[in-house]
Amino acid sequence: MAGNLLNIGKTGLYAAQAGLSTTGHNIANANTVGFSRQTVIQSSLPAQNMGNGFSGSGTEVADIQRFSDQFLNSQVRVAQSSASALSTYGAQIGQIDNLLADTTSGLSPTLQDFFKSVQDLTANAGSTASRQSFLSSAESLAARFQGINGRLDEIRSGVNSQISSNVDLVNSYATQIAKLNDQIGVLATSTGHAPNDLLDARDQLVLELNKHVKATAVPGANSTVTVSIGSGQPLVVGSRAFQLATTSTPGDPSRLGVGYVTPGGVTPMADATLSGGELGGLLDFRTGTLDPAQNSLGRIAMGMAASYNAQNRLGVDSAGNPGGDLFTLAAPQVSANLNKLPPDPAAVPGAVAVTLSDPSKLTTSDYTVAYDVANSLYNVTRLSDHKVTAVAYGAPGPATQSIDGLDFTFSGGGADGDNYLVRPTIGGAAQFKVAALDVGAIAAAAPILTSAIVTNKGGAVVSEGSVDKNFLLPSSVFTPATLQFDAVTKTLTGFTSGQTVKVTDAAGAAVNYVAGTDPIPYAAGSTYTFGGVSIAFKGQPVDGDQFSVARNASGGRDNRNMLLLGALQSTPLFDHGGTTYQGAFAQLVGAVGNKAREVQVNSAASDTMLAQTSAAQQSVSGVNLDEEAANLLKYQQAYQAAGKIMQIASTLFDTLLSLGR
């Protein structure tokens, strides 16, 4: 009986000792990140049949259990992934928001200075100082476009570096998780018990992994976990870790993407599949804000260059020569053929060329062009909304289709798999430069002069006249004309024979006549358009009155074309004639600012969600020092009681021995 009592006391002593050790372990790791509190699970030993009943034989430590809820752990990982993504996005977009909205380094002040120089030159068309001021302001505007674009390029380069760093960290975490899987699996199999501290370490690694990319952990055999990312690609399976790698994006070598390493090479992963974490936030920022911002800036630069060049060509410079380009207009970027299939050596390779035709229709989107062999057509996809425009094509072409203010020209023989990436505006700001380096090259004057002959006796007056883009067409070579009024037929003569003359009355109704064939009626208030020239008459002429339309041989102090250049400031150019230059930039600033605010609000909400889920998790897994202090007392008392049992057993045994002496 004393021996049994001694054994009971011993088992109780061991159990209390295990409880004290476990409680001490909890207290020591109360501030250890990722630690889950542990507790001793006891069970009673089999009772002995004493004939008149069963007598207990003590206790044993069945297991050391950790408090960990997989559902709560999963919620924390999801919240952590979202919070990290939004925090990263917010840090990146804040740079662009500050850059564009700055009242001193932004584009708006420089635009205002440039437009002011245009107005100054309009008032002093013959002033060399005003012309030089105009060129200086144009140089400042070009430098600002290039400076802002250069800063965006730096941000893009920083994104590439951070993508590379995050890929390295993801690979490192995957390797560590795989090693822990191996250790945990071996220990769980050999001992039949879970190695709690290793499980905590692995859970913490999975949580750290979610700071960089959204990862899903699913329990596997022998207490291992399978970790997957993206659209289900395995990152860790048992003791095997898979790897990611950075890749150059097809069509844009400067743009880093993420690929999945397989035995056959690196398979690119779509940016949209890598959501969550810093990596997902970086990719989302680049696609959702950086690309549109740089494209928008490029669109403004290209629109300004195209419109100012077009208007300057419609004037004459100080020497009387036709105006040229004021600014360098960037060409849309078209990648090389991205077809991965080997080309047919006997076939003529296909080609795609893109030129800007109408700035008012230009968008901020990129495009893909793919050849459909079965239907003999090219599919042009606008990436911003995935709108597809099909262009019928019969080799060898060429065929041209205008889409969003861009002329897509296809030539050669299209092959299966041919595809191209078109980025119309990405280089617009970087290549925006001043092309007119001489003050005399500014075409401030109009190319024509109109006048009424001094001997006229009637009261008719001819307008100064204006020209449009047709004035520059080879088919519309301007010929000076002297128009004469015939009172009998009430018509005008003197137009170049065979030339089309459009007569638009005051109400806007227009009729086309052919000079030399049709009589061209005179009507006060009507506008006459011929060869790209438009003139209007007021008043009533008398028979024989003449009106001259001639070339302007010298720019001199003429500011008529400069007035039109100045009017471009308030001319709605973009969005199909709905937005001015400054309006387009304001849209860009507003879009970035609104997105920055949206990310800021969502980030704050995500941080709150992370705090709440972490608190819920810690309510299960966290160490409560007050509770552990109570456990210390409980196990201390149990230890003392078990020792007392052993002391009593020893006394009883000594009593029995004394009876035999």
Image: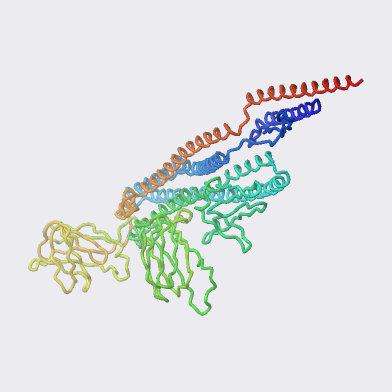
In this view, the residue in front, 326 or 36, is 36
In the rendered image, the quadrant that contains the N terminus is: top right
- The residue nearer to you, when weighing 111 against 194, is 194
Quadrant of the image occupied by residue 500? bottom left
* Residue in the image at 51% along x and 56% along y: 270
Which image quarter is the C terminus in? top right
Residue at the far front in the pictured view:
51
Q: In the image, residue 603 lies at what x, y percent?
A: 49, 39
Picture quadrant of residue 193: top right
Residue 548 vs 180, above or below: the answer is below
Left/right placement of residue 454 relative to residue 219 reads left
User: Looking at this view, is 9 or 587 the one in front?
Assistant: 9
Res 41 → quadrant: top right
Q: Is residue 144 left or right of residue 116?
A: right
Q: Looking at this rendering, what residue extends furthest in the right direction?
A: 661
Q: At x 83% / y 22%, what residue is drawn?
A: 650
Q: Where is residue 50 shown, x and y percent of the image?
A: 74, 30
**x and y percentages locating residue 407 in the rendered image:** 38, 65
